[in-house]
Structures are given as structure tokens and as C-alpha cells.
Image: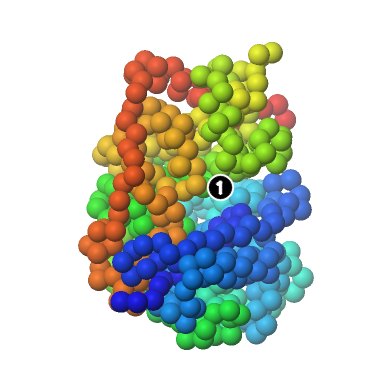
Amino acid sequence: MSGFLLSIDQGTTGSTALLLSPEGRILGRANREFRQHFPRPGWVEHDLEEIWESVGGAVTDAVAKAGVAPKDCLGIGITNQRETTVLWDRKTGAAVHRAIVWQDRRTAKRCQELKDAGKEAVFRQRTGLVLDPYLAGTKLEWLLDHVDGARARAEKGELAFGTIDSWLVYRLSGGKVHVTDASNASRTLLFDIAKQRWDEELAAELHVPMALLPEVKSCSEVYAQTSGVPGVPDGIPIAGMAGDQQAALFGQTCFEVGDAKCTYGTGAFLLMNTGSEVVHSENGLLTTIAWRLGEQTVYALEGSAFIAGAAVQWLRDGLGLIASSDEIEAKAREVETTGDVVFVPALAGLGAPYWDPHARGLIYGLTRDTTAAHLARATLEGMAFQIVDLVDAMQADAGRPIKRLRVDGGAASNDLLMQFEADMLGVTIDRPENVETTALGAAYLAGMAVGVFGGLDSVKDAYRIERSFEPQITRAEREGHLRRWRDAVRRARSEMRIT
């Protein structure tokens, strides 16, 4: 079969376009970054037109690099930053406000009010989620309450809500289709993951009109055709869709119960396939829909660390310790240890298993001898330590050990980080040939819908491990590292600070 699949990976700091041949070869790739907007401390927003421009630019660049004709695109897959919340005019497509990003903490007070009112149990039982400002539901409620006229217009059916996937399909289809997929719907605090439908009671609790919500589809089917998109021919099927972490789980071919992966991107996200069973966490994790193929739904346990690669960006942009993110490994290798410096990267609060939106970043153990290299190494180790906490919680919930962990995302290319992760977990880390499995997962889902891939077995055949990292330290050494980390986390938690 000739032609190519286009995967649009719309992330937190940039948009990536990946072109994949029917044989599973990468033909071209391009990325365009866009601005982050911080109107107040703890608030993070994105301009949707800047996102759209970045998507178009990335697609144009990738097609040019691959030397292919746009008309030969067989189908488009979409994966996205998940809980980022968009509200737009159904007729014009214009956003009524900048998108509120998943990292945004402005609804922390509202989440606490709901907890104090005893509402968390019902939300957790039906959605698999905790009440945290990370998720989309309270962000949508905030938009309806704080944008002039938004609630009245929403009740009249003039506005549409969606996560970034939904908005992209709307734009790519020329405003004809308002849909989302099951994996993204499961991140909204509004979707009953067992009954597979929007929950009217939860929507009423958050004062969200049902008319705002998109139709929920599977992760691999033709949702619409392109229409009126500059540089993209009309009539190309938009055929695959999944939230970024679920797409990475799929791209890592974690198709068996117990398979697990960790993506190291702006944040870090650990997911384990739990099959057709909804496993409710008792250790601070989330239960989520991994994907839906036809009528079959696969679930996952998930742990999220809000800050991973973003900590490296902070070293670069906030402190000026490195000129580019790529320099972090070389800088960290200038020293053999951190000199007992520990960095807790709670720059947007702490996610699982703590769920402490008021925690703050902490650098602990500084001395007169501390250098930029020690901070660089502590930053990488802080990323790895967060995953240890997630793995501990996940193994307890699942009742089974994680014997091997598949990794992906930009920071997975960092050998120092991956070796330290293997040392701290005491398990083998497998890194694939292509660490951009998020985009691959979306391409695979689209390819299955348009007949490029015959099914899960043909997707599995394309997976290749590039390198495995084995633990190299003793148990006593590991425990010493973890004691220092847990002491630092205790100090970073909100209840330990003077207010």
C-alpha cells in the first residue's frame, strides 16, 4: 500500500506532526513550539490560534521533510494534552477564552469545597478520578462562571466544550463535527467510565449544561473528513484519537494485562493495562479508560507527576543554568552524585499519589560546595524519584509487580536518567527505537480504522526495543536514596509549611 498516515501530537509546549508509512517507517517529523501564558501565579493558559498555527506549521514542515504529496495521506490520528479545557462558539469556532491548561491550579479552592461537602466518593466511584484542579470538569465550571455571558450562551446551546482533541477535529472538519473519544472523555470528571456515558448528576454538581458536551466515540474509527484546512486536501479521514498517555500505552503495544509504560514529557505519566476490569485505586492513583476499540473497552491505572521535563525547562528558562534542554545530561555528568542535594519538582503542586495542589518545589541539602551540575543531576533524579512513588502505589493497587517498564517521551533518551530510574525501581527499563510512541499510538489507531493495519498483532510486529537498562546498585544504596527523597517530599508538602 502506498501513501502515509499523519499523526498530530498536540502537546503542552508544542505540536508535533509525524508521518508514518504503511510498513510502520517514520517518513518525516516536525515540531513547532508555542507560547505559554501565565496570567497569575498558578494559572496556565494557551491561545488556541497559536496552537492551530503550530499544528499547521508542523504538518507543513513534516510533509516537506518527507517529500510526500499531501493528497497521499491515508488518514489522520490525533493525540493531545488531555485535561486542557476549551470552550468555543459553535458557529464561528472562536474560543470564548484562552484554553485552561491541565497544569493550571486556579480551581484548587473549588475542589476543596467539593471534598468538604463529601462529594469526592461519588466522583471517584463513577469517573475513577480524584477531585483535583488538574482535571477538566472544574476548569469548565470556572469558564462558565467567569466569562461574561458564557453560562447563558451555553444553556442556549451556542457554545461547545471539549478537550484539545475535540477542538482539533472541529477545526479539521470545518466546524462540522463535535466529538471526543472515550479516553479523553474519561479525564473530565463528567464521564461514567463503567456505563460509558456522560453522567447527568455529576454535570449538575459542576453546573455544566449537557448540551455543551461532545459525542463520545471509540479511539479508532472515521469521525469526519478534512474540510477547508489550509495545506491539507479535503476529504482525508480523521480516524484515530486518544489522549496522549493512552496513545503512548497503545504505541508501546502494552496490550496485555499488567503491561506498563512511563512517558517522560512535560510531566511524567505511568500507566498499567488492567484489561476489561475497572480497578479502583486505594493508593492515590487514577482509574482511566485506556482505549475503546469497537465495543471493547480497556482500562488502566494511572499515576501522574505534573512536572518532569518542565523542570529542565525551568533550569533553562528560569535559572539560566543551561542554554538548551539537551545540555542537561552533560551538565549532570560533570559530578558523580548530587552531593546529597534533593530536588522535589512540585512546581505545580504534587500529583499522584499525594494530590497536594499546595505543595511547592523544594531544593534541599544545599551547601557552599553545591554547583549547577549538582542541581542538574538532582533535577533528573527528582524526575525518577516521582516514578518510584507511582510504581509503589500501582503495584499495591494492581496486586502484581511491574517486572519490566517500557519508557518513552523526550527525556527517555537521557541515558543517565534511565539508568537511575532502573536503579531506583530495581527493574529492567526497556526503551524502544522510537521514543515518540505517543504520536505512533495515534497513527496506529488511525491506521487500523482505514485498513492500513489489520489489528493489534500487526501493530505489535512494528515494535522494537533499542536498549534495556538493568539495575546496577545494591538494595542498601537504593534505600538510602529513597530515604532522602521521602524526607524532602515531607518538607515540600503543604501541611509542613508555615502559613
Relative to 41, residue 452 above or below: below
Relative to 116, residue 386 above or below: above
In the rendered structure, the answer to whether residue 485 lies left or right of residue 13 reads left
Question: Where's residue 380, x and y in %?
Answer: 53, 32
Query: Which residue of the protein is positioned furthest toward the top in this rendering?
Result: 368
The N terminus lies in quadrant: bottom left
Relative to 115, residue 487 above or below: above
Question: Where's residue 20, x and y in %?
Answer: 40, 66
Please say whether residue 211 is visible from this viewpoint: no
Q: Based on the displayed image, in which of its 4 quarters is residue 168 positioned? A: bottom right
In the rendered structure, the answer to whether residue 289 lies left or right of residue 104 reads left
In the rendered structure, the answer to whether residue 478 lies left or right of residue 108 reads left
The residue that appears at 39% across and 44% down in the rendered structure is 407
Residue labelled with disc 1? 266
The C terminus lies in quadrant: top right
Q: Amino acid at mark 1?
A: Thr
